[in-house]
Amino acid sequence: MTTTIFRGGRVIDPEAGTETVADVVVTDGTVSQISPLPVLDGDATVVDVTGLVVGPGFVDLHSHVHSIAGQRLQAFDGVTTNLDLEAGLMPIDRAYAEAAAAGRVLNYGFSASWSDARGQVLAGITPAADFERSAGLLGNLDWQRTSSPAELAAWLDLLERELAAGALGIGILMGYAPRSDPAEYLAVARLAAAAGAPTFTHVRELVEADPTTPIDGSSEVTIAAAETGAAMHHCHVNSTSRRHVDRVLGTLETARAAGSRVTVEAYPYGMGSTSVGAFFLAPDRLPAWGLAPSSIVMVGSGERIADVRRLEEIRELDPGATCIVEFLDERDEADRELLRRALAYPDAIVASDAMPLEWPDHRADTREWPLPPGASTHPRTSGTFARSLRLMVIEHGLWDWPEAFRRCAYLPARVLDEVAPAMRAKGRLAAGADADLVVLDPQAVTDHATAAAPVRPSSGVRHLMVGGTFVIRDDELDPGAYPGRAVRGELR
């Protein structure tokens, strides 16, 4: 039996909304005791955390980081469970098997991929459980169309099989096929409701940006939730709503007040990241969002797109290439306030939309630490959670520490309680909870990643434990720690 005692920290229970000074005892991967009185240590390892904040590790519902390098960056951001639920991977068995074989720093899991299933049926492209390959599909017009009845039945069957194999819901990249028939979305929601699985949607265009859209993207989520009873999660409301976020949040609040199962996430950046071939980055679509080609910067090369001709050229040559899109001006206080309002919305979940690291030599991953120079990505990969804490707790006082852990750990874990009962032991700090823990210095926690230096780790995470194993101790990463375990849906 292995026991670790975190002694005398400010212990956060986000479920109860409390903060107390206590000892946290971890035994064989589980929180065995929380005591306001000092616990006799015996043969235990004792870690003095006086003055530090101790809470459940953060659960990131929306991370496209499937690498050791990326997960280490997320560990320094306080994340202990890293899930790709907006896009997902297919086939699900292969995704889990390959992650397990490679080893993972953090707990991991995947949804069933709507876009991969449609791509297989409508475009004849066989998925390979590879995010970069799937991202290359996004600029392909063949899979974006409305399905015939036979095609619809075929890809719904694929999704149903993926759920039966343990996928954590259905990830729906509707924003990349925004002209497809809304009836298909309802069919997916009905499938999810019948399976007791949530959906995770990157919504299609808002009516403000495209009056010709078949249906307003955010309203589509709420309509489907009301008609089917499915649990519907609205991904990155900040980046798909932009300056219309107040209207969108009002739409979601109306649905929630009526009893619909709608959840929402946000991240604290005014720039997004996606494949340059995305529908909404077509030159004729940019003005609807007040964007220009110069709002787009290519990851890796750092090239800022000069004009429409260059944008068309890149979209033709490499539609899957990753870019950064500056959709708000973070120098403008009004735009910064929009980001804060999205995070402050009641029960809004923090999720990173972390992107893969790209290397000049095109390597897929590295186990070197510190990371070798030259990697590029969106700074949200390194800094989403620390930046959210800095903004919402430290600088603006909009959350206290129990509320911060509720947004970053407790609420995201609860999204998956029905589909994955193992999640019920995560996002909590109480006896019997999984020992996925983060210990923060409340005076030092902050982000350092920027667009110019996107892989600078956050600071302030003094200790991070996954399943009872230290990944970070005394600010130092253990490069030999790979304690991450799969989070899977119940086999059906």
Image (tube, rainbow, N blue to C red):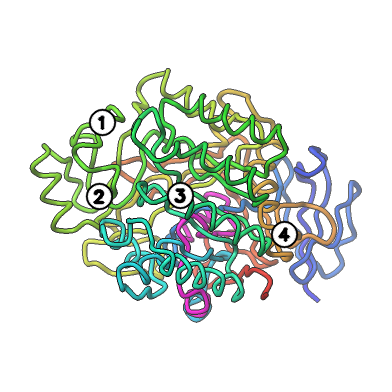
| Residue span colored magenta | 71-97
* Label at residue 353: 3
- Across and down, in percent, residue 240 comes to 42, 38
Provide residue 183's location: percent of width, then percent of height: 48, 51
Amino acid type, residue under disc 3 in the picture? Asp
Name the disc covering residue 276, or none: 2
What residue is rendered at 55% in x and 75% in y?
A: 161
In primary-sequence order, the first of circles 3 and 1 is 1
Q: Position of residue 172 (x, y in %)?
A: 47, 55
Q: Which amino acid type corresponds to the residue marked 2 in the rendered image? A: Val
Q: Residue at x 46, y 35 (%)?
A: 238
Circle 1 packing at 10 Å, graded few (<14), some (14-19), many (20+), is: some
Q: Which mark is residue 291?
A: 1
Q: Is residue 438 visible?
A: no
The residue beneath circle 4 is 418
Asked if residue 469 is among those painted magenta in the image, a careful observer would answer no
Q: Which badge, 1 or 2, comes first in the chain's sequence?
A: 2
Q: Nearer the viewer, mark 3 or mark 2?
A: 2
Residue drawn at (24%, 56%) of the image = 321
Q: Is residue 173 above or below residue 445?
A: below
Q: Nearer the viewer, residue 189 or 443?
A: 189
Q: How many C-alpha atoms fall within 10 Å of the one at disc 2: few (<14), some, or many (≥20)?
A: many
**Structural distance between the alpha carbons of marks 3 and 2:** 16 Å
Q: Tell me the quarter of the image containing the N terminus.
A: bottom right
